[in-house]
Image (cartoon, helix red, strand yellow):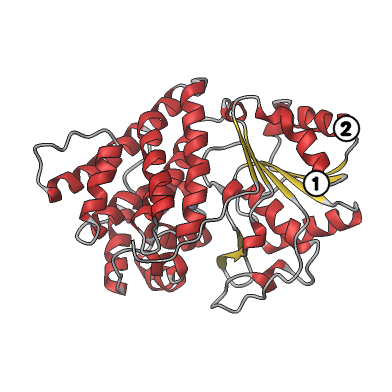
Amino acid sequence: MNKIVEFYAPGKIIFGPGGLSQVGVEAKKLGSIALITLGSSAMRKSGTLDRLIHLLIENNLKYVIYENIPSDPTVETVDSGTSVARKGGCNLVIALGGGSVMDTGKAISAMVTNEGSVADYQEIEGKGRKLNIKPIPFIAIPTTSGTGSEATRNAVITNTKLGLKKSIRDLCLIPEVALVDPELTLSLPPGITATCGGDALTQCIESYLGKKSQEITDALALHAIGLIGKSLVKAVKDGKNLEARENMAMAALLSGLCLSNSGLGAAHALSHPLGVYYKIPHGLSCAVLLPYVMEYNLPIVTKKLVKIAQSLGEDISLLSETEAAQKAVEKTKEILSQAEIKENLLEWGIKEKDFSQLIKDAKGGSLNNNPRNTSDEDLIELLCKITGLY
Ligand SMILES: [Zn+2]
């Protein structure tokens, strides 16, 4: 390997069933007044929020709650959360939720110390401002196994004024602590389990195949792909299967480490505009695009696809290299279909007249990292495949 690589991870990763019990002790090391970011009422109803608060109080911390964060957080979501944190004198952010809640918490932790609106810092045509001041500490506690935001350096925020979904990105955004407790995912409904798992799988495969892939994340990605192959369908069919939940939580965490250090690809590039224009959940569009993108990339990354097939437990001993690579695509399709993810997005009514705008908005870092370069015609063909119209 003839290149210099770098690898960044959260300051501390705590992983395991019951891990939530550590939050008070960890929080105490980092601050005294926590802003807790939350989504809808699931964490309140399950009693998890009460447990979190109890653990904070036990360690003499105060807290302020910022809740009802929508599934696609906007610039306004972050800016108003930042005001709440500043007013409450918060010197620590704890996110308890899925990717949107973690991304919001992460962005708020930076905006508390940096001036202006989060919109000023978004990666829009490379114009985003740099975060000059260190954010307040951030603890990420994922409650879905999907985005891997607990391990990444970016937060995806929707800019409704510009009609774009773009990241703020900086090494200082990597959480101080990623606290991953698989027990928190036991009550996740099958549909969300499937799409979040599909997102994690897409993240692992895209970072593994991508131009910026490197040995450290390659090892993590292949291991995570194996875990997902073994456990996604089990977690969807039987949510209370703790071993499957543990495997999915680990895979999601690893997928975050992979994407943050080695980037993504065409499935993620197209998923962002599909989320903005059609409100298609991120994990769903990624999962539907994934096999088509793998197939598109096959001629360039044949050997790597063979490794993916092996990680997914396929016997490739009697196959040619191309056949074995094709097996990775087929097995991925099979896993996603057993997880009840449809093979196209027909019901979302994607229109051909929107293709040129979708393609324009898909351009950027993820697309540039795709192993096979894409022309507009190639992207149109991918979109045709997922619409289910052709
Ligand atoms: Zn993703």
Q: Would you name the residue on which mark 2 appears?
A: 57
Q: Residue at x 36, y 60 (%)?
A: 210
Q: Amino acid at mark 1?
A: Leu
Pick the front one: 83 or 301: 301
Pick the front one: 352 or 205: 205
- Is 180 situated left or right of 76 in this image? left
* One can see residue 281 in this view: no
Residue 134 vertical placement versus 205 (above, below): below
Question: What SS does tag 1 mark?
Answer: helix
Q: Where, quadrant-wise, is the N terminus in this rendering?
A: bottom left
Residues tagged 2 and 1 counted as in contact (Cβ below 8 A)? no
Res 318 quadrant in image? top left
Pick the front one: 185 or 224: 224
Find residue 149 and report its horizontal and vertical position in percent: 58, 49
Q: Residue at x 84, y 59 (%)?
A: 83
How many numbered dots are placed on residues in this image? 2
Q: Residue at x 62, y 62 (%)?
A: 171
- Which numbered disc covers residue 30? 1
* One can see residue 307 in this view: yes
Question: What SS does tag 2 mark?
Answer: helix
Q: Earlier along the polypeptide chain: callout 2 or callout 1?
A: 1
